[in-house]
Image: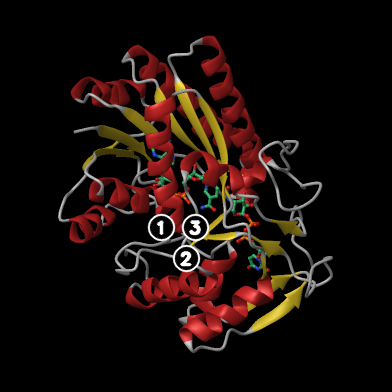
Amino acid sequence: MKTILVTGGAGYIGSHTVVELLNSGYEVVIVDNLINSNIKVLDRIQSICQKRPIFYNCDILDKVSLEQVFQKHDFSAVIHFAALKAVGESVREPQRYYTNNVSGSLILFELMAKYSVKKIVFSSSATVYGDPISVPITEEFPLSATNPYGQTKLMMEQILRDIYAADREWSIGILRYFNPVGAHSSGLIGEDPNGIPNNLMPYISQVAVGKLECLSVFGNDYPTHDGTGVRDYIHVVDLARGHLKALEYLEANGGELIVNLGTGTGYSVLDVVKAFELASGKVINYQIKPRRSGDVAKCFANPAKALELLGWQTTYDLEQMCRDTWNWQQKNPQGYT
Ligand code: NAD
Ligand code: WQD
């Protein structure tokens, strides 16, 4: 039985990945400091899987506590989700982002080396493509960052490539996610942002449920089919399954893997509003507002490499993403609390 250490496993993408891991027969150990998640997610995971992951309330910056976790378990790989992820906050509090995301990861990698756990799947982001020269985006596109959060992802990718270059016993999977949305079909786990959501889908679903009044659409003068920003929304369950495929790939081939995880299809803000209205039967009030600084017109993946190397492709469409978001939102109007 393989045991996987999942950092940030109580969070949005982490919890969905833990469900897929448990359902595929892996043992799972979660390390999470609950800075952006809720302990109740463990009961929910247990309800879905009839199995409970082992959980440590531990900050990855706390090397002593993290080392105790490595001493207690024999991990075959690490999936590393733990990070702070709010772009605007990262501009206001850059040091906190660099410390948490970069220093925290360095401590994790040091312990992985010490305990000879040299297989890792890392959560990167389409943000590493900055303002892309064109779409769809392939993995060879130039990389850049437009904010400290994105910079931490670029730095982590570089650190992992350097670790692999120095020691070929490591195997490294860098997964560049596009825009994760949706929730598990049970409605038991989903995205539970603190305060007012920054991201489009949770904002829309809180308008639909009556928690927020009106969506601000940030700009309708982009060079897109209706003037609003175009993104590659991917169902979180498809994304979670990509991590299992990446683990299997690294198990079989070793080496260094860098892949986009997206659907390959771009939808505008207004496309998402319409799809959500259909899925929920609710009217989404919106107002056009100025562009949000740092936003790009279009961002969507060429996911061909993930299909070729991992045999992975997405299975859920935008309608299903909206239905599952709405199901989670209705069943949990206050999130986990
Ligand atoms: P999330 O905030 O729901 O999950 C991250 C988890 O990590 C949380 O449970 C948080 O409590 C934990 N965490 C943060 N710092 C920690 C620390 N120092 N020690 C221990 N635990 C810590 O976010 P998510 O959306 O599930 O994102 C998971 C990963 O995917 C992150 O690395 C994020 O940057 C990346 N990512 C997310 C998106 C997205 O839009 N959601 C897109 C691309 C990449
Ligand atoms: C999507 C579209 C907005 C909110 C961010 C991070 C990225 C990655 C995923 C982690 C854009 C528009 C949004 C609103 C709106 N995260 N919008 N009104 O900006 O593509 O990506 O999350 O790695 O790094 O930057 O996602 O959901 O914020 O925005 O009109 O209230 O919706 O302008 O066109 P984004 P998003």
Query: Between disc 2 and disc 1, whose residue precedes?
Result: 1
Which quarter shows the C terminus? Answer: bottom left
Asked which quadrant contains residue 258, the reply is top right
**Residue type, numbered disc 2:** Tyr
Asked if disc 3 and disc 1 are in contact, CB closer than 8 Å, the reply is no
Res. 221 mark: none
Query: Element type at marker 3?
Result: loop
Res. 316 mark: 2
Q: Give the mark count.
A: 3
**Residue type, numbered disc 3:** Thr
Vertical position of residue 327 compared to residue 148: above or below? below
Asked if disc 2 and disc 3 are in contact, CB closer than 8 Å, the reply is yes
Q: Nearer the viewer, mark 2 or mark 1?
A: 2
Q: Which residue is mark 1?
A: 237
Query: Between disc 3 and disc 1, whose residue precedes?
Result: 1
- Give the left or right position of residue 105, taking residue 288 as reference: left
Nearest the viewer among 63 and 180 is 180
Place of residue 185 in the rendered image (x, y in percent of width and height, measured from the top left): 34, 68
Q: Residues within 10 Å of mark 2 (few under 14, many from 20)?
A: some
Asked if disc 2 and disc 1 are in contact, CB closer than 8 Å, the reply is yes
- Tell me the CA gap for discs 3 and 1: 9 Å
Place of residue 70 in the rendered image (x, y in percent of width and height, measured from the top left): 27, 23
Q: Quadrant of ligand 2?
A: bottom right
Nearest the viewer among 109 and 50 is 50
- Tell me the CA gap for discs 2 and 3: 6 Å
Q: Is residue 210 visible?
A: no
Res. 314 mark: 3
- Tell me the CA gap for discs 2 and 1: 9 Å
- Give the left or right position of residue 96, taking residue 300 as reference: left
Q: Which residue is rendered at x = 35% and y = 63% of the image?
A: 184
